[in-house]
């Protein structure tokens, strides 16, 4: 089997949730949360995670509006993704993440995670949801 480890990011203004796929690029798991500031440190930390985990692909959630349009937050994510591409010397795919944080919140609530613990885990769980949706989407495209 081809090693296809993929890193998923849920980029926020304060925190960046990080998820990692298994070696086959099939299943996503929450990995960690990185502070989004200072900006240079965030880029360096993501670079370290990419190298340590032998990541071959990076995907970042793109927060489109509910109408599917690019708003101000999505523009900030696109800018960050371009900076990350330059820092990593690899492309960063952008994938629609509408409602991923709400889905992560609901998942943690359903699992009985206490509110104070949810705040610590929400970003990496949202990143895992984004990554899993991306992995499923790309797998469906290749099977079509």
Image (tube, rainbow, N blue to C red):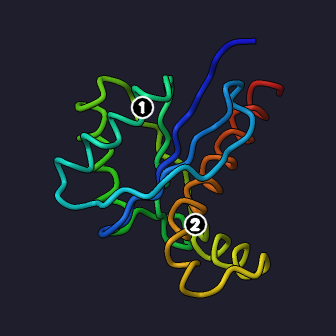
Q: Is residue 11 visible?
A: yes
Is residue 117 shown above or below 20? below
Pointer 1 local density, CA inside 10 Å: few below 14, some 14–19, many at least 20? some
- Gap in angstroms between the C-alphas marked 2 and 1: 25 Å
Q: Is residue 98 left or right of residue 86?
A: right
- Examine the image and state in which quarter residue 144 appears: top right
Which residue is depicted at the point 60% across and 53% down? 30
Q: Is residue 10 visible?
A: no
Secondary structure found at label 1 = helix
- The quadrant the N terminus occupies is top right
Q: Position of residue 120 (x, y in %)?
A: 50, 72
Q: Position of residue 95 (x, y in %)?
A: 54, 48
Q: Residue furthest right?
A: 143
Q: Earlier in the sequence, mark 2 or mark 1?
A: 1
Is residue 144 shown above or below 60? above
What residue would you read off at disc 2?
A: 98
Q: Position of residue 89 (x, y in %)?
A: 29, 23
Q: Position of residue 122 (x, y in %)?
A: 55, 70
Which residue is depicted at the point 54% across and 59% down? 124
Which residue is depicted at the point 62% across and 76% down? 102
Q: Is residue 116 left or right of residue 75?
A: right
36 or 118: nearer the eye? 118
Is residue 53 shown above or below 117? above
85 or 126: nearer the eye? 126
Q: Is residue 84 left or right of residue 144?
A: left
Q: Which mark is residue 113?
A: none
For the residues bearing labels 2 and 1, Cβ distance under 8 angstroms: no
What residue would you read off at disc 1?
A: 50
């Amino acid at each position: 089997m081809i090693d296809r480890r993929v890193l998923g990011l849920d980029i926020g203004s304060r925190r960046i949730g990080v998820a990692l796929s298994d070696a086959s690029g099939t299943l996503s798991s929450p990995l960690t949360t990185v502070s989004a500031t200072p900006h240079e440190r965030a880029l360096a930390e993501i670079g370290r995670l990419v190298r340590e985990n032998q990541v071959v692909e990076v995907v970042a959630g793109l927060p489109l509006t509910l109408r599917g349009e690019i708003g101000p937050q999505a523009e900030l994510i696109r800018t960050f993704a371009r900076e990350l591409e330059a820092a990593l010397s690899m492309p960063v795919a952008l994938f629609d993440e509408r409602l991923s944080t709400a889905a992560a919140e609901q998942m943690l609530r359903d699992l009985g995670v206490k509110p104070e613990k949810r705040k610590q885990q929400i970003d990496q769980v949202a990143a895992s949801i984004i990554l899993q949706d991306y992995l499923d989407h790309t797998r469906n495209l290749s099977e079509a």
